[in-house]
C-alpha cells in the first residue's frame, strides 16, 4: 500500500469531514430531530389521488402538481419505474395512467399514448398485481368477483391457530384487515364513461369478467389458497341469515382498525394501511366528518412535500432512524457529545421511546416495552433495527445527571426488548419474532405485499454491532437489563455490556450469519440495496466478535465477504448496486457509484482490513464527489421496501453514511 499517498489525503479529509458536519448540523430541526425526504415511486401519488376522491377530497391545484410530477418521471418508452433509472413497471404505469385519465388527461395525448402502448405490450391490466386491480375495482374498472376474497371472519381465528392475523407481517396485517371490509362491501365509485379503461385491456372482454388467478405451478402451495378462496366465494353467495357471524366480524375488524390509529392519524405511520383503513371505514359507514377519518386526513398533510410545481407523497417518514444515524455520524466525526445539537437530538430520541405494548406483545407476552419506532408516531409497531441504532446513538452522549440515568435505563430496556425478540434460528427480523410461516408466502395478495417478516442478515448484524458498541474490553461486571439497569453505568455515564453475558444469543446469531452467507461470499440486505448493504453490516460485526467466538468459522466467512465486497468496486473507486438485485436474486451492478453504497462498502472493508487500499480508494471517491455545501448528490434508490415491488430513496443516506465512512478512515489513520 502507498502509505505516503494515503497520508497525503488526511489534510483534505479533515476539511471534507468539517464540511459534512456543518451540512448535517444545518439539517437539524428545532425540536432536535433530523428527517430527510423519503421518496418511493410515482404510484404513491397516483394511488393517493383516486383514493382522496373516494373520500370526497378533491384538490385541483394538487392534482395539477401531481400531473407535473408524473410527466417529469415518465420514461422514454411511456412507462414509469419503481426506482430511478429502473425498467418500466406495468403496475406503476397502469396506476399512473388511470390517475391521469381520471384527472382529465386525454388518452390521445402523447404521454398517454406511449404509456398505453407500454401497458398493452406488457400484458395489459390482465397482468397487473392484486393491488392495482383493487384500485381499479373501486371505480368499476375491474370486477370484484375476479379478485381473491379476504373474509372479515379472519379476525376471529384464535392466536393459537396455525394461521391468524398475527402470523402476517405487521404491514400486511393492517392492510388485509382493511381489505377485508372493502372486499366485503365491494363498493364502486362512479366514473364518467370517458374515464373508463377499456383501451388498456388486451382482451376487452376481461373488462367485465376479469381474469382468474392461476398458480405458478399446477401442484404448488398456491392451490391451497385457490381452493380456500373458492370456498369463501361460495360462502359469500349464501343468504345473509346463513352468514350469522359476518356482521359481528365486520364490527370487530372496524374496532381493531379504529383502535390502531396513531396520534398523528396514521396506521403504523405508513401509507398503504393508512389510505385503505380510511376507505374501509368509509365503507363501514364513517363520514368524512367522523373524528377518525378527519384525523386521518389531517395527518396526511405532514407526509406531503410540495412546491410550486410538484407534489410528492412520502410512503412513510424516518425521523427516529435519521436522527440516530445523524447523531452517530456527528459524534464519531468529532462533534462533542456535550454540544447543544447532540444534546437536543438525544433528548428528542429519549422522548420517542415506546413504553406501551404493541402487536409484538402477542408472541412475546412476557416481554416488556422499551423500544423505538421508525416514524414520529407508531406505538404498535416499534422495530428492532431502530431500537438498536438508537441505543448505539444514545450511549456516547453525555446528559445532565437526572437525564443520564433516564438514558441508561432507556438503553437497558431497549437492549432487553431486542434480545427477547430474537428468532429461534438466531436471527432478528424487523418487527416481530418468528414471523415465518412460509405457507403464507403463497396467498394471492403476496404479489404486491410481503406477507412475512423474516429475520435478515442486515438486522441481525446491526443488533450484534450495537451489542458490541455497548461492550467494553476489560469490563466484565454483568449489567442487568431490567429496572435496575442504571447500576451498570460507569463513571463516564456510559452503559457497558459484556458480550459474553449474552454468549448463547450472540453465538446463535453468528451461526445464522455464517449459514446465511451467499455462495459468492456476500450477504443479503433486506432493508438496504442489497448485497453491498448486507455484507457491509456483517463485516462491521467482526471487531466485536473476535474475542467472543471460539472458532474461526466467522472469521473465514468475513474474509470471504470482504473479498467479495472488494471485487465489486467500480473503476471510479466507488460502489453502486441496482435494485434489480432483488428481482434477480444476485448482485446487479448499477453502472454508477453512489455515496451511500460507497460509504457502506468502505465501512465494511475497514472493519476487517484497516489497511485496504481499495477502501482508501472509496474514501478518495467520497472526497472527490462531495459538493461545496458539504453534502453529496444521490438520485438513486438505495433503501429497501418490499423487494421486487417497492423501493425507497432516503434523503439523508447520502450525507450521514459518507460522513461516517470518512470519519472511520480518519480514526484509523490517526491511531
Image (cartoon, grey):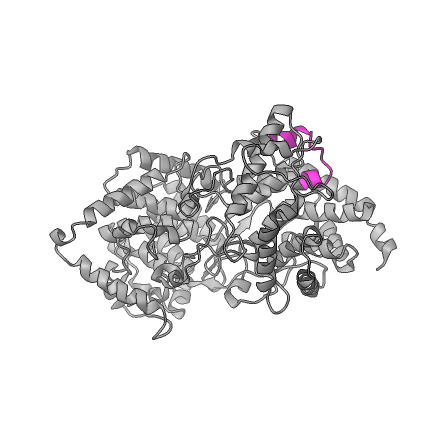
Toward the viewer: 174 or 406?
A: 406
Extreme-right residue of the structure: 4
Q: Position of residue 90 (x, y in %)?
A: 41, 63
Q: Is residue 337 magenta?
A: yes
Q: Quarter of the image holding residue 116? A: bottom left
Q: Is residue 204 magenta?
A: no
Q: Position of residue 204 (x, y in %)?
A: 27, 68
When the figure is inspected, residue 493 is found, relative to residue 520, above or below; the finding is above
When the figure is inspected, residue 44 is found, relative to residue 234, above or below; the finding is above
Is there any visible trace of residue 56 in the rendered image?
Answer: no
Q: Position of residue 149 (x, y in %)?
A: 27, 58
- Residue at image position (52%, 54%) is 640
Toward the viewer: 551 or 592?
A: 551
In the image, taking residue 36 as reference, residue 61 lies left or right, namely: left
Q: How many marks?
A: 0
In the image, taking residue 276 as reference, residue 556 lies left or right, namely: right
Q: Position of residue 531 (x, y in %)?
A: 60, 61
Q: Quarter of the image holding residue 19? A: top right
In the image, taking residue 112 as reference, residue 373 lies left or right, namely: right
Is there any visible trace of residue 503 in the rendered image?
Answer: yes
Toward the viewer: 322 or 513?
A: 513
State the extent of the magenta-drawn residues as a range: 329-345
- Residue at image position (11%, 51%) is 241
Q: Quadrant of the N terminus?
A: bottom right
- Residue at image position (25%, 68%) is 205
In the image, taking residue 282 as reference, residue 346 lies left or right, namely: right
Amino acid at each position: 500500500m502507498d502509505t505516503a499517498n494515503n497520508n497525503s489525503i488526511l489534510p483534505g479529509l479533515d476539511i471534507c469531514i468539517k464540511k459534512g458536519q456543518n451540512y448535517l448540523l444545518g439539517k437539524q430541526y428545532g425540536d432536535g430531530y433530523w428527517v430527510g425526504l423519503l421518496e418511493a415511486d410515482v404510484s404513491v401519488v397516483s394511488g393517493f389521488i383516486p383514493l382522496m376522491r373516494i373520500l370526497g377530497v378533491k384538490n385541483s391545484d394538487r392534482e395539477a402538481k401531481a400531473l407535473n410530477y408524473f410527466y417529469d418521471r415518465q420514461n422514454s418508452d411511456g412507462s414509469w419505474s419503481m426506482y430511478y433509472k429502473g425498467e418500466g413497471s406495468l403496475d406503476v404505469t397502469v396506476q399512473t395512467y388511470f390517475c391521469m385519465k381520471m384527472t382529465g388527461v386525454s388518452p390521445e395525448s402523447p404521454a398517454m399514448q406511449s404509456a398505453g402502448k407500454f401497458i398493452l405490450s406488457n400484458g395489459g391490466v390482465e397482468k397487473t398485481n392484486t393491488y392495482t386491480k383493487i384500485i381499479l375495482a373501486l371505480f368499476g374498472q375491474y370486477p370484484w368477483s375476479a379478485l381473491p376474497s379476504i373474509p372479515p371472519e379472519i379476525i376471529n381465528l384464535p392466536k393459537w391457530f396455525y394461521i391468524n392475523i398475527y402470523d402476517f407481517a405487521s404491514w400486511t396485517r393492517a392492510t388485509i384487515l382493511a381489505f377485508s371490509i372493502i372486499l366485503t362491501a365491494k363498493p364502486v365509485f362512479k366514473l364518467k364513461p370517458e374515464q373508463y379503461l377499456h383501451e388498456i385491456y388486451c382482451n376487452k372482454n376481461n373488462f367485465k369478467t376479469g381474469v382468474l388467478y392461476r398458480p405458478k405451478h399446477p401442484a404448488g402451495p398456491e392451490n391451497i389458497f385457490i381452493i380456500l378462496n373458492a370456498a369463501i366465494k361460495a360462502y359469500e353467495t349464501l343468504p345473509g341469515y346463513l352468514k350469522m357471524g359476518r356482521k359481528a366480524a365486520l364490527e370487530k375488524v372496524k374496532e381493531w382498525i379504529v383502535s390502531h390509529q396513531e396520534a398523528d392519524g396514521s396506521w403504523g405511520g405508513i401509507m398503504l394501511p393508512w389510505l385503505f383503513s380510511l376507505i374501509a371505514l368509509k365503507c363501514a359507514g364513517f363520514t368524512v366528518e367522523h373524528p377518525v377519518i378527519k384525523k386521518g386526513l389531517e395527518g396526511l398533510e405532514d407526509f406531503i412535500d410540495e412546491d410550486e410545481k410538484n407534489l410528492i407523497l412520502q410512503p412513510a417518514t424516518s425521523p427516529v432512524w435519521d436522527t440516530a444515524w445523524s447523531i452517530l455520524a456527528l459524534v464519531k466525526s468529532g462533534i462533542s457529545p456535550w454540544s447543544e445539537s447532540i444534546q437536543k437530538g438525544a433528548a428528542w430520541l429519549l422522548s420517542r421511546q415506546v413504553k406501551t405494548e404493541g402487536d409484538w406483545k402477542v408472541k412475546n407476552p412476557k416481554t416488556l416495552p422499551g423500544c423505538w419506532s421508525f416514524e414520529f408516531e407508531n406505538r404498535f409497531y416499534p422495530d428492532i433495527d431502530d431500537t438498536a441504532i438508537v441505543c448505539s446513538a444514545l450511549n456516547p452522549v453525555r446528559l445532565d445527571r437526572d437525564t443520564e440515568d433516564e438514558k441508561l435505563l432507556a438503553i437497558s430496556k431497549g437492549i432487553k426488548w431486542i434480545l427477547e425478540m430474537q428468532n429461534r434460528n438466531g436471527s432478528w427480523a424487523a418487527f416481530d419474532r418468528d414471523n415465518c410461516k412460509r405457507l403464507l408466502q403463497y396467498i394471492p395478495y403476496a404479489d404486491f405485499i410481503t406477507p412475512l417478516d423474516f429475520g435478515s442478515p442486515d438486522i441481525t448484524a446491526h443488533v450484534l454491532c450495537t451489542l458490541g458498541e455497548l461492550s467494553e474490553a476489560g469490563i466484565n461486571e454483568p449489567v442487568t437489563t431490567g429496572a435496575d439497569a442504571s447500576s451498570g453505568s460507569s463513571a463516564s455515564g456510559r452503559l457497558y455490556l459484556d458480550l459474553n453475558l449474552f454468549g448463547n444469543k450472540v453465538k446463535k446469531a453468528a451461526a445464522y450469519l455464517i449459514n446465511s452467507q451467499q455462495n459468492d461470499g456476500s450477504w443479503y440486505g433486506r432493508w438496504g440495496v442489497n448485497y453491498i448493504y448486507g455484507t457491509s453490516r456483517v463485516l462491521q460485526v467482526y471487531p466485536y466478535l473476535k474475542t467472543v467466538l471460539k472458532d474461526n468459522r466467522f472469521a473465514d466467512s468475513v474474509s470471504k465477504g470482504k473479498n467479495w465486497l472488494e471485487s465489486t468496486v467500480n473503476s471510479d473507486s466507488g460502489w453502486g448496486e441496482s435494485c434489480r438485485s432483488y428481482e434477480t436474486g444476485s448482485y446487479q451492478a448499477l453502472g454508477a457509484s453512489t455515496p451511500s453504497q460507497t460509504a457502506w462498502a468502505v465501512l465494511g472493508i475497514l472493519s476487517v482490513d484497516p489497511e485496504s487500499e481499495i477502501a482508501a480508494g472509496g474514501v478518495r471517491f467520497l472526497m472527490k464527489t462531495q459538493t461545496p455545501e458539504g453534502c453529496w448528490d444521490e438520485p438513486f434508490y438505495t433503501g429497501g421496501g418490499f423487494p421486487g415491488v417497492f423501493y425507497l430513496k432516503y434523503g439523508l443516506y447520502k450525507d450521514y453514511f459518507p460522513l461516517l465512512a470518512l470519519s472511520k478512515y480518519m480514526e484509523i489513520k490517526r491511531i
